[in-house]
Amino acid sequence: MERLAVDMDGVLADVYEQFFRYDERDFGKRRPPEEVIGVEERKAFPYINEYVYTKGFFRTAPVVKNSVEIMTRLNEKYEVFIVSAAMEFPQSLPEKLEWLKEHFPFLSWQQLVFCGSKTIVDADIMIDDHFRNLDNFSGITILYTQPHNQLKDAGRHKRADSWADIASLLL
Amino acid sequence: MERLAVDMDGVLADVYEQFFRYDERDFGKRRPPEEVIGVEERKAFPYINEYVYTKGFFRTAPVVKNSVEIMTRLNEKYEVFIVSAAMEFPQSLPEKLEWLKEHFPFLSWQQLVFCGSKTIVDADIMIDDHFRNLDNFSGITILYTQPHNQLKDAGRHKRADSWADIASLLL
């Protein structure tokens, strides 16, 4: 059975929607989506460094559309691990655990990995929205489209614009 | 640079000393060490499942003798990762982070991994006190002696009875 490493923020958890919501709270109006396309997350949202350290930010993130259904099927076909580079935000660790238990109850704690660097991950396939995690990975790599990577050439990585695309690639 | 994965509980953190202290608190006398040699942790300490879910258990664990000094030197020679199968005890995650920051401040959050199963770890050398983590690892394996594994044949694993032994093997 092939081993599949799935990123959390920006792939399962819709942190961009959280950024938009927190930004709207702070500036009084919802930012037009096109304003953040092709812009690094930290540049697109001025107060992002406060948001990601705010209690509840990760716990209340919405689920990325269709990810639950497709992950249910992937979990039957692959040895799935959820790999989150969460160590930078210590307060996020229990929140992420609770979030996964709520939204992906079919995954067990044995399938979770919280790390600082993903270089230590041994898997066959990796899904992530950040080049820094995919570029050093030797297996098959799938770049999940988010505004920050949308205008970049995916290079050797396959690009998935949606979970339907992931299903097409892996199921 | 070779990558070295170091276990936390029973290798860096002296959880046995914590078991002895909690056990003494509950039963009124310190258990003689020879009583737990060759006995599984869960059988040696009747209330262990309460201890490991107790707030503060991991945060206040003593440091294993000489581990700080030897780890300082290993950290210069190897690409060190601390890999803890901590996902079973969610409350332990922030405690373990704080514990590491206090006792091993020369390690960065990039070097930490909390997982459920260590099968996902890609490294060259692994130090652990549990056969279940070492047996499926394809690199060099060092079994750190603790009462629960003391009477077992180390098999293909090298055995280290102390951090001085680890220094002899790796420095």
Image: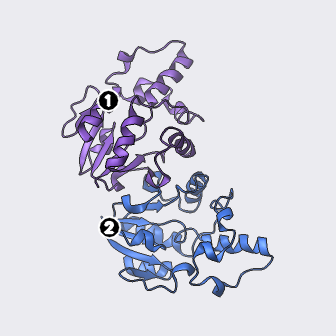
Chain colours: A purple, B blue
Residues under numbered marks 1 and 2 in contact, where contact means CB atoms less than 8 Å apart: no
Vertically, is A40 above or below B11?
above
What residue is shown with label 2?
Answer: B124
Q: Position of residue A61 (x, y in %)?
A: 51, 31
Alpha-carbon neighbours of circle 2 within 10 Å: few (<14), some, or many (≥20)? some
Observer able to see residue A152: yes
Q: Position of residue B164 (x, y in %)?
A: 48, 81
Q: Secondary structure at mark 2?
A: loop
* Amino acid type, residue under disc 2 in the picture: Asp
Quarter-of-image position of residue B83: bottom left
Q: CA distance from mark 1 to mark 2?
A: 36 Å
Q: Residue at x 47, y 66 (%)?
A: B7
Q: Secondary structure at mark 1?
A: loop
Q: Residue at x 54, y 75 (%)?
A: B66
Q: Position of residue A87 (x, y in %)?
A: 48, 48
Q: Where's the C terminus of chain A, which quadrant?
A: top left
Q: Chain of mark 1?
A: A
Instruction: Give the camera-side residue of A65 and B148.
Output: A65
Of the numbered discs in the image, which one, if any, rests on residue B105? none
Quarter-of-image position of residue B159: bottom left
* Amino acid type, residue under disc 1 in the picture: Ser
Report the side of B141 relative to B68 (left or right). left
What residue is shown with label 1?
Answer: A162
